Amino acid sequence: MPTPNEPPGRQSSSRRLEGEFDYVIVGAGTAGCVLAKRLSEDPNVSVLLLEAGGQDDYHWIHIPVGYLYCIGNPRTDWLYKTVAEAGLNGRTLSYPRGRVLGGSSSINGMIYMRGQREDYDAWARATGDASWSWDSVLPVFRKSEDYHGGASEYHGAGGEWRVEKQRLKWKILETFAQAAQEQGIAATDDFNRGDNSGVGYFDVNQKRGVRWNASKAFLRETMKRPNLTVITGALTERLIFEGRRCVGVEFRGDVDYVARARGEVILSAGAVNSPQLLELSGIGDAQRLKALGIDVVQDLRGVGENLQDHLQLRMAYRVNGVRTLNTASAHWWGKLKIGLQYALFQSGPMSMSPSQLGAFAKSDPDDPAVTRPDLEYHVQPLSLDRFGEPLHPFNAFTASVCNLRPTSRGSIHIVSADPRTAPAIAPNYLSTDHDRRVAANALRLTRRIAASPALARYKPEEILPGAAFQTEAQLVEAAGNVGTTIFHPVGTCRMGRADDSDAVVDSRLRVRGVDGLRVVDASVMPLITSGNTNSPTLMIAERAAAMLLADRREGAHARVDASPPLPVI
């Protein structure tokens, strides 16, 4: 019979293995890989890293265009979906999250983006901790960076996180960039100096045309250390508390396991799974947990709240007189040429990140409240009706544009005490007047770019969402029709000041009201960054590792001899 604290459907195992470590890290995504490397650099520290997914040995992870075969694939993706969204006219969305070593860095768009100076200065104000300001975190970004242009005031060289230029160019993208400049968006060659205004090609986390995920960067060589144990196929089901101190985790592989932490347990499971695991373990809104039969350890109503995401609005244009990937890959000989180009030179369409050209602009330059870019474009030399479907049989490009700083807030909450049941993901897109206004303005700006002289010679024809949408109300409707996630969920365990009753963690990422537990991933962001969120998550993990090691040096916990490591699954 299950014990009283076991989730429904779980049967007690006659085989139950235990191990003890200084640190137990849940989740081997970007943050978990960084933490595992940094914490295990001290040979006297024992570290356990748990990953629900498998090894990152699937070949499509490493070929950049392979994201098409990783998203929606149970081998690499949790396969989450949102609830029906009113702002999206009742649609539900797939919500990809990496379920493999490297986490979402193994399936994402590989874009290296920090965001804007003001993002981090706002974090410092939200937490009352100046160490989260831009000037404080810039050296942290530089520490782990290996930038293609070498070290400078803004970039680092020799770090683990490789940043390269893309190995391709498309005439249609060059022309879009010219058209954007005609609309007042200046050209730039670097989006990562604190002001990402402008238009240009994205830098990417690749190494000679191959995806460079967090597993390669931080974990692969580190796994050889005798004081680091990495277990894949390990679904963490709950945290273990003794009084108000977190002392370990229970997880399942081929049998049941208990991993105890002499020092701390660190949740790095991401913006979906970290709040899920907190709630499963009795940390969250007390009324919600009691309704599910979960004993309350700490009443924290902010757990799972404050979900922020970038909603991209996909606009597609048919063009004439210029080739795009739609026709370049339409026949077997085109596919053969593309395959040979990658096999021989690791360049061309197979080295493409999902989006190649970027632009950052203001949704309304005449509005004095819009003081910095609040829109990001991801421009692609292709078009299709929706992700996973075939490319259109004619030449076209897609200009996806997202509101960088949405005011809509959603939530992620468990619906069952069973850890195998997916949580309810409700982003609540376009739920504020501000976000609806920015969406309408974003669609208008894209149309102005498409109508610019540079693109006129290709006779662009809007095929998505369609030129019939003209009024403010119609444009909001169109945004609901074409809007989709750009895979940047953050904020569901946000950090804040001591007097902020909705904050889940403090500025040192310690869960409020309990001991021995931190959250280190994108869920701790109080506000979403103005750009892609993977590298900011890496920076958070670098800072967290330094905090943990500093606390250890100050005697926060004393080490005793390690017990034998758990067997690798």
Image: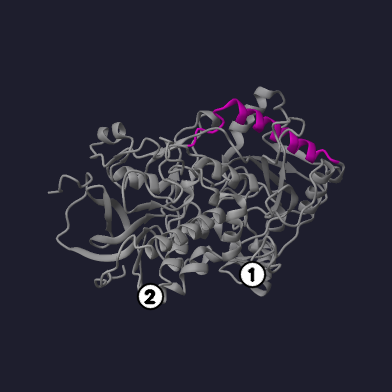
Q: Nearer the viewer, mark 2 or mark 1?
A: 2
- Of pointers 2 and 1, the one earlier in the residue sequence: 2
- Which type of secondary structure does the marked residue at label 2 adopt? loop
**Crowd rating for badge 2 (residues with CA inside 10 Å; few <14, some 14–19, many 20+):** few
Q: Tell me how far mark 2 sits from mark 1, CA to CA.
A: 26 Å
Q: Is residue 498 above or below residue 521?
A: above
Q: Is residue 493 above or below residue 481?
A: below
Name the kind of residue labelled 2 in the image.
Pro
Is residue 192 shown left or right of residue 290? right
Which quarter of the figure has residue 136? bottom right
Q: Position of residue 295 (x, y in %)?
A: 23, 40
Disc 2: which residue: 43
| Residue 115 shown in magenta | no
Helix, strand or loop for the magenta stretch, by majority: helix
| Residue 444 shown in magenta | yes
Give the tally of numbered discs.
Answer: 2
Q: Residue at x 29, y 61 (%)?
A: 261
Q: Quadrant of the C terminus?
A: bottom left
Residue 257: in sight, yes or no? Answer: yes
Disc 1: which residue: 157
Give the magenta part as a residue range. Answer: 427-452
Residue nearest the observer in this picture, 280 or 469: 280
**Crowd rating for badge 1 (residues with CA inside 10 Å; few <14, some 14–19, many 20+):** some
Q: Position of residue 274 (x, y in %)?
A: 39, 48
Residue nearest the observer in this picture, 74 or 279: 279
Is residue 463 shown left or right of residue 64? right
Q: Position of residue 75 (x, y in %)?
A: 43, 58
Q: Residue at x 24, y 50 (%)?
A: 241
Name the kind of residue labelled 1 in the image.
Ala
In the displayed image of the protein, which residue is found farthest to the front? Answer: 554
In the displayed image of the protein, which residue is found farthest to the left? Answer: 1
Is residue 151 shown left or right of residue 26? right
